[in-house]
Image: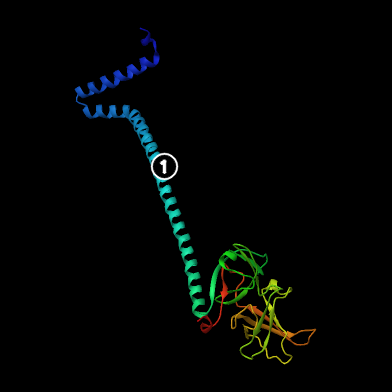
Amino acid sequence: MSIFKNKFFVICLCVALVLAIVPSVFSIMGYQSLSKNIVGTLTFPVRWGVSAIADGFEGIGLYFTSIDALREENEYLRGELESLEDQIEESLLLEDENERLRSYLGMKKKYPSFTMEEGRIVSHSSGNYMTTFTLDRGSIHGIEVNMPVITLDGIVGHVTEVGLNWCMVSTVIETDTSVGVYIPRSGVRGIVSGDYSMRYDGVCKIEYVNADADIEEGDKVLSDGMSSVYPADLEIGTVIDVGINEYTRTPEATVRPSVDFKSLDWVMIITGYGSEEEKG
């Protein structure tokens, strides 16, 4: 037969016969342990190969199982992270809302005779300090030109232009803004106005005061209520420098506003004010 002409087959057949006959002979002769030793030695390569192949397949299975487990864990962690991010964002929004409500309630307590409309800044002028900005409130909300704009810290500015659902505000550091003021410590009166050379530093100045005006660094500056725009006793800022106007030779002071124009997001527009008796 042609199969017996195949050398590989013949060799395998001989090895198989040897493995079958030799151990039997040694077992019959009483050398059973020697027989087991020979069989174990001769079959070790085959057993080792089979074991290695089995371990390999088991390792591959564990590898793919680990990949699936890691993928599931990553999906779970990603979902947890997104949930935490949503919670943080919601907490920040609630904190911002609470801060606004506290500020509003603080102003209602401080100024009980004011009627106010809250406004959010939607755009503003460029620069380190915003000198003008736009609010999301307009004529449909009862907003009119020259209405004062404040925060709990003090005067921000006044409305200069009104649209249907927006309005433009000029701050106290803008050049076209002026406020009648007084200094409670000394009773000095004057005008706080914006100055082109100062506005990008976030400050304004007091001028038009008497030649013997008593002004010192650290003096608080409040609105005097003499104009038709701002009610009395709203804080404007603090004197940070005192000098002499080179043209009029009268005292002139630099004022740092109480309001931080860098961090403004929400403000209050005073839509009406007066004493409680007047309201009654």
The image quarter in which residue 24 lies: top left
Frontmost residue, 259 versus 64: 259
The residue lying at 71 percent from left, 87 percent from top is 209
Left or right for 102, reference 174? left
Q: Secondary structure at mark 1?
A: helix
Residue 183 percent across, percent down from the top left: 63, 87
Query: Residue 240's quadrant in the figure?
Result: bottom right
Q: Which x, y percent locates residue 97?
A: 48, 67
The residue lying at 46 percent from left, 61 percent from top is 90
Q: Nearer the viewer, residue 2 or 84?
A: 84
Q: In front here: 134 or 250? A: 134
Residue 273 place in picture, x, y as percent: 56, 78
Write down the residue under mark 1: 67
- Please identify the residue farthest to the bottom as the structure is shown: 212
Amino acid type shown at disc 1: Ile
- Position of 244 with respect to 165 (left or right) is right
